[in-house]
Every structure is written in C-alpha cells, then in structure tokens.
Amino acid sequence: MSRKFVLKSVCLFLGCCILFLGTFVYGEVAKSDFAIGVNYPGIGARYFFSDKISAELKGQIEKDIFVGGLRGYYYFKSEEKLLPFAGLEADFVTFKGDDSKGTGIAGEVFVGGEYFFNKSFSVQLDLGPAFISLKDTKDTSESVSGLEYVVNFGINYYLGK
C-alpha cells in the first residue's frame, strides 16, 4: 500500500471517530473571532467579521504543488450544532514536474457544513465546482483550463471565548 493511501485512510478513520465521539461531548457553540484549521494537505486561519460572515487564508502543499488562497464564508445559522454555509474561494497555484513547471489560478463556489463538538472544536466538509487554469512556463507555453469538482474536509480549533 502507498503512504498516501495509508495517510488518507487514517485521516478518514480519525474523522469518523471524532464525529461519533463528539455527539457525546457536545457543548454550546460559541465561535470566537479567530480559528485555525488543518485540512489534507494544508492549514488555514479564519477571521469572523460577524456571526454569519468569515474569511479564511489557506495554504496547501503537496509534492511539487503549492496552492494558496482566500475563502469567504456565509453561515446560514449562527447558533446551532451543525452550521450550513456557502462560499467562494480564489487561489494561486504553482507546480513543478519532471517535464513541466508553471503557475495558475483556481476559483471555487462551494456549499457545506461545520459540525461543532464543543465551543472550540469543529469539523467541516464542503464541496463544489472549481474552475482551474494552469500554464506551463518551463519549455512550452501550453495551458489547460477546466471545471473540476472539489471536496474539502477540515478540522478547526477556535481561539478564545
């Protein structure tokens, strides 16, 4: 088995365990102004402008690929255990391979939900279509663009309150 497959399997198993155990330790939901999060394979920092609107600066690194961007969230409810949301994301992409090297952009519209286990700890899942455009700048000027569907899973820790 590959290392990637094992890592993804462990993350999925731990996420399921957290969801199951979290139903027994749920407390009140009290988002603070700041949150930090981890997702595969990256991190993010989120700031809440209000109970319904937040922005997240995120970065993801995989072998020879970097994606950095900004996400905007709109929460439909503000004081529930499960908070549905929708949002927009804009990213900058760099990549390097054996035969290619280049940059690109990505934009995504997504919907999802964030489930709170207690006032400081949550998991989130979202999905949506993403338009991705990449350009090779190594030896050619080839480019490719297209629509892909993206699923994101993250674990968040809220600071303060």
Image: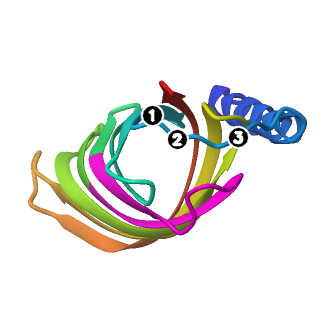
- The residue wearing badge 2 is 31
Q: Mark 3 points at which residue?
A: 28
Up-down: is 129 above or below 89?
A: below
Give the left or right position of residue 136, taking residue 157 as reference.
Answer: left
Magenta-tinted stretch: 69-90
Looking at the rendering, which quadrant does residue 51 occupy? bottom left
Q: Callout 3: helix, strand or loop?
A: loop
Say the numbered circle drawn on residue 104.
Answer: none
Q: Which of 73 and 128 is in front in this view?
A: 73
In the displayed structure image, the side of residue 34 where residue 120 appears, left or right: right
Q: Where is residue 21 in the image (x, y as percent from the top left)?
A: 88, 34
Callout in the foreground (1, 3): 3
Query: Dot 2 surroundings within 10 Å: few (below 14), some, or many (20 or more)?
Result: many
Inspect the image, locate mark 1, and give the three-letter code of the amino acid beneath it.
Answer: Ala
Kind of residue indicated by mark 2: Lys
How many residues crowd mark 3 within 10 Å: few (<14), some (14–19), many (20+)? few
What is the basis of the colouring in this image?
A: rainbow
Of residues 66 and 16, the one drawn nearer to the viewer in this rendering: 16
Q: Which mark is residue 35?
A: 1
The local secondary structure at tag 1 comes to strand
Q: How crowded is mark 1: few (under 14 residues within 10 Å), some or many (20 or more)?
A: some
Question: Magenta span has 120?
Answer: no
> Image point 9% across, 60% down: which residue?
141
Contact between marks 1 and 2 (CB within 8 A): the answer is yes
Residue found 28% across the figure and 61% down from its top? 106
